[in-house]
Amino acid sequence: MTLQVYRVHHSRLKDLLEGAITGAKVVGNNEGLPLDGLTLLFNTPLGGSVTFSASGPTGLLTPLEIKAQIEAAVATVDVTFPDGRLSMRRKNANINLDAAGTANTLLGFNIDADTTGTWVNPPGGGVPEFVTADQIGDGHLQVILDE
């Protein structure tokens, strides 16, 4: 049994527990990224992939367009943009983004190793298992998981 302690903002607790993976780059609400023709490749769900397509003259995709294209191509993936960064999770399952995706760099995902998000089980449900969460001020929580 290995206990891991995380400090997360309360708004990100769901992301942690549901195994979300979040890119490091801020996309912005009205800005776009030059993702036309680039890909995201998923190992889990098996064979999931997205090839982005920009329809406007700028060749840029907004967060809403990115979300729509990912969710249309990989139906089991939910997309959000907390703090302007792309975050993806699967419904009740782990997610694994392949490092070989050509859009990874622009979205802030690793290109040297796959990015994995692991769904956390409720107490008594096997590892990784949620143990407890306590508020520690300014909207943050200390979360303990058994991994």
Image (cartoon, grey):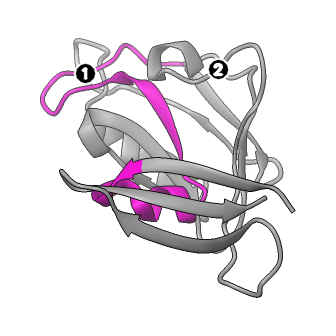
Residue drawn at (70%, 68%), measured in percent from left and top? Answer: 93
Residue lying at the far left in this picture: please name it.
Answer: 30
Q: Secondary structure at mark 2?
A: loop
Q: Amino acid at mark 2?
A: Asn
Badge 1: how crowded within 10 Å, few (<14), some, or many (20+)?
A: some
Residue lying at the far bottom in this picture: please name it.
Answer: 124
- The magenta segment: 8-37
Badge 2: how crowded within 10 Å, few (<14), some, or many (20+)?
A: some
Vertical order, 49 against 124 (above or below)? above
Residue drawn at (76%, 30%), measured in percent from left and top? Answer: 114
Q: Earlier in the sequence, mark 1 or mark 2?
A: 1
Q: Quadrant of residue 10?
A: bottom left
The residue wearing badge 2 is 110
Q: Amino acid at mark 1?
A: Gly
Where is residue 6? Give x, y as percent: 53, 49
Q: Is residue 27 magenta?
A: yes
Query: Quarter of the image containing the C terminus?
Result: bottom right
Circle 1/circle 2 CB separation < 8 Å? no
The residue wearing badge 1 is 32
Where is residue 4? Give x, y as percent: 67, 52
Residue drawn at (31%, 44%), measured in percent from left and top? Answer: 81
Total labels drawn: 2
